[in-house]
Image (tube, helix red, strand yellow):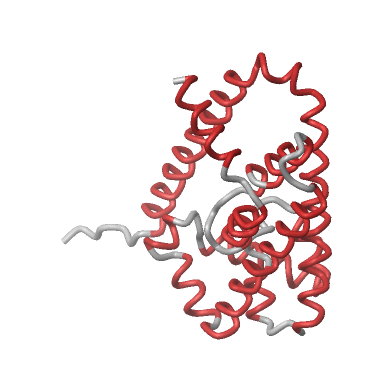
Amino acid sequence: MGEIIQTVVDWYMANLNYFTVFLLMVIESSFIPFPSEVVVPFAAYKAADGGLNVFLVVVAATLGAMVGALVNYYLAKYLGRPLVYKFADSKMGRMLLLSEEKVDHAEDYFKRYGNSSTFIGRLVPAVRQLISIPAGLARMNMRNFLIFTTAGAGLWNIILAVVGYYAYELKDKILPYLDEALYALGAAFIIYLIVKAVRNRKKKKENSPADTAD
């Protein structure tokens, strides 16, 4: 198992470049669940090893985040609230780990903090990927949207890049425990998916109309 994981990691690192960073961050910043934590830190780690430029990694990641955010913005703007919520609660939406609650939470966050939420929200888990949806629903001014989103995404990517870049200096201390760390991360992700599925199923049962006796 350890060899398989190492092979996957080696393949991933070998194919990690500015374009793949950009593409993965487009996905991460759209409604498709994909964590930036497995993109920017690894790319910055590779930069510390001389394979990439850490500044360009941050630029590529931020541009990708912007494109993904624009996808959410325009989809929300032109589809409108009813269709957005309907999609979030559809089977496809649930497969993408969306829900009415998540969209509603992002919309409440946007209403609470206004335009600045597109900056602050980029730093908040569970809001980061979806904050562009309420901005689109509210038809937020595009210039402000671009400014706040770029600033927030840029700051988040800088933080991740710093973590990955300086992790390279600790590699001799990290490598002996790499397998254990990967196993732990994999197990945590599987547990998260199971808990999420159980909660969604429980909620679906609670929201379904009760059977009435004849």
Residue 89 is drawn in which quadrant?
bottom left
Q: Identify which residue is drawn at 77% across, 76% down.
A: 145
178 or 54: nearer the viewer: 54
Query: Residue 181: where, in percent of width, then height?
Result: 62, 23
Query: Residue 154: where, in percent of width, then height?
Result: 80, 59
**Taking 205 as reference, is 27 left or right?**
right
Q: Identify which residue is drawn at 49% across, 29% down.
A: 7
Decide: is 213 above or below 53: below
Query: Residue 189: where, in percent of width, then height?
Result: 53, 36
113 or 52: nearer the viewer: 52
Quadrant where the C terminus is found in the figure = bottom left
73 or 42: nearer the viewer: 42
| Number of disc labels | 0
Residue lying farthest left? Answer: 214
Residue 207 is drawn in which quadrant?
bottom left
Quadrant where the N terminus is found in the figure = top left
Decide: is 120 above or below 156: below
Q: Identify which residue is drawn at 68% across, 66% down.
A: 131
Decide: is 212 above or below 13: below
Q: Identify which residue is drawn at 57% across, 59% down.
A: 27
Residue lying farthest top? Answer: 176
Query: Residue 190: where, in percent of width, then height?
Result: 47, 34
Decide: is 157 above or below 73: above
**Taking 209 as reference, is 99 left or right?**
right
Residue lying farthest front? Answer: 50
